[in-house]
Image (tube, helix red, strand yellow):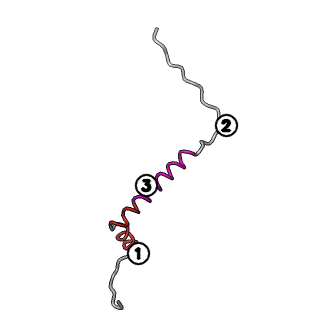
Amino acid sequence: MANETDSSSGLTKLFRWATTPPQAYVVYVLALLAVYGVTFLAGTLAPKKHLTVSPNQVSVPTAK
């Protein structure tokens, strides 16, 4: 172990660990829950109400 020449970074090791079959299922479910949570929170946000004057409606010419 003293002459270990493994040049893999920590991120690569984490990716390899997360993509092995038992952990991959858990990572997949956690990713789905994270996406669901973010979309749920984004959907519950109330839009900000601005007190700006809306532009006048443009009238559409009608055929005679």
- Start and end of the magenta stretch? 28-44
Callout 3: few (<14), some (14-19), or many (20+) C-alpha neighbours within 10 Å? few
The structure residue drawn at horizontal position 53% and vertical position 48%, both measured from the top left corner, is 42
* Residue 17 percent location from the top left of the image: 36, 71
**What secondary structure is marked by label 3?**
helix
Residue 10, numbered label: 1
**Viewer-side label of 3, 2:** 3
The amino acid at mark 1 is Gly
Q: CA distance from mark 1 to mark 3?
A: 24 Å
The answer to whether residue 34 is above or below residue 19 is: above
The residue identified by callout 2 is 51
25 horizontally vs 58: left or right: left
Give residue 27's mark: none
Residue situated in front as seen by the camera: 49 or 51: 49
Describe residue 20's horizontal placement relative to residue 63 as left or right: left
Left or right for 50, reference 28: right
Characterize the local packing of mark 1: few (<14), some (14-19) or many (20 or more) Cα atoms within 10 angstroms: few
